[in-house]
Image: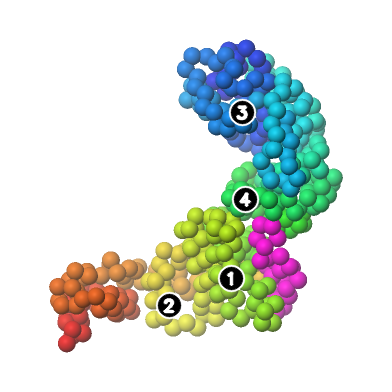
Amino acid sequence: MDIFIPEAVKRLAAAAGTPIYLVGGCVRNAYGKLGDTDVDLCGPLIATALNLPRGARVKIVNYRLGTALISFMGGNFEYTPFRLEKYAEGGSHTPAEIKFTTSLEADAIRRDFTVNSIYVNAATGEVKDPVGGIADIERKVLRSYNPERTFSSDGLRLMRLARLAAETGYKIDAATARAAIASAENLKDITGERKREELDKILNADTKYGVADAHYRGMKLLVRLGLLPYVVEPLAGAEEIPQNPEYHAYDVLEHTLRTVKAAPSGIVRLAALMHDCGKPYSYNMYGNMHGHEKASAVITRDVLGQRCLRYPKEVVERVAQLVEHHMYDRDGKTKEGKLRMFVAEHYDIIDELAALMRADKLGTGKFKEEELPANRIVAVRDKMLEEGAPTSLGDLEVSGADITDMGFSGPAVGEILSELFRECVLCPKLNNREWLLSYAQKRLK
């Protein structure tokens, strides 16, 4: 088939003095009709040895691997020379030994999957497929040429296998799946940052190429391949934790994955994955799951934090808040005054929290979308907005300076502002300067 080759790449190839090939995702996606992706290039020479046209710039990204970024005609293209790799035991993701080669076939064999090992000559359009990648794309199968070596060399490829299968909708070759299961422990040697990047892609796999429920399938593959304990360890064994059949059709793990399935992409899906991670701990420790949301929030901060997956602090804290409050007003009996204060104190996460609560209900297997009642927290939030209720201290018609000028000092300033805030949340019409100062003046006496 004809594969689109950008004009800039054609000019680079025409001047290079040696063959340059398109490889990897851009070729795979063209054959699989999956959509556009970044153009990656490779060839038998290192980038600085190429005879590039005037105006082309080369920036070495990784001297050891020979990876370079070639910028030309407004485009940026990653280029790698053909190479051989040797890894230490344990699948640490970093090659112990690198050797550059002029052999395209040798380069193809060291790549992860056959669908990523198809080479298109950027000057002539000639296709080289030394390990049968095109046939695998036609069969919609992910296969490794040497799966034992693939996963023993680089443990991150285990998660990459699940992620690519989910994103593309492809099946996994049986021998490749067996080797992945046998190599699952190699994920232990992968850094938290690397696992986090793949986990995020799996959780949002349906947004990559539009494959329905790809994120759910990706998470199921992590389970079936035995990888989940090395990514989110507290969920290990969650499939053995039963739940009250009156409220849940699934065990803790399947409920978690179905909550992920029902959640919108982004941070809510991460919260969905973590929202019940405290249930196994609570069940094993106390024999029940009462208050599991508190345990889940503590575990979330640990797993997503610096010890494990190393998410940014603001992401960790936001997800932990969503997890901690996902059971709030579960029975719908919270008084409106308390709901108003909850909204005011957590105003910035209300929509995400409502989305998590909705997904949690759908994940029980006991509700249909059309049967879900309106979220009371959102309704109260909307009512507060209509009334002009404050949602932060900054919305008050007086400031800390005003309170200080009245004679308050130290902690008393914050205490008075908090009192005024509460009164105005409960009764927004009180948020006028005259009433606020009068209230504060009475408290001064």
**Residue at image coords 76%, 71%:** 240
Hey, what amino acid is under mark 2?
Answer: Leu
**Front of the two marks 3 and 2:** 3
Hey, what amino acid is under mark 4?
Answer: Thr
Residue 246 on image: x %, y %: 69, 80
Above or below residue 172? Residue 307 is below
**Residue at image coords 57%, 20%:** 48
User: Closer to the N terminus: mark 3 or mark 2?
Assistant: 3
Under circle 4, the secondary element is loop
Q: Which residue is mark 4?
A: 191
Residue closer to the observer: 86 or 14 = 86
**Front of the two marks 3 and 1:** 3
Under circle 2, the secondary element is helix
Residue closer to the observer: 363 or 438 = 438
Q: Which residue is mark 1?
A: 296
Q: Which residue is mark 2?
A: 339
User: Looking at the image, how many numbered discs can be counted on the residues?
Assistant: 4
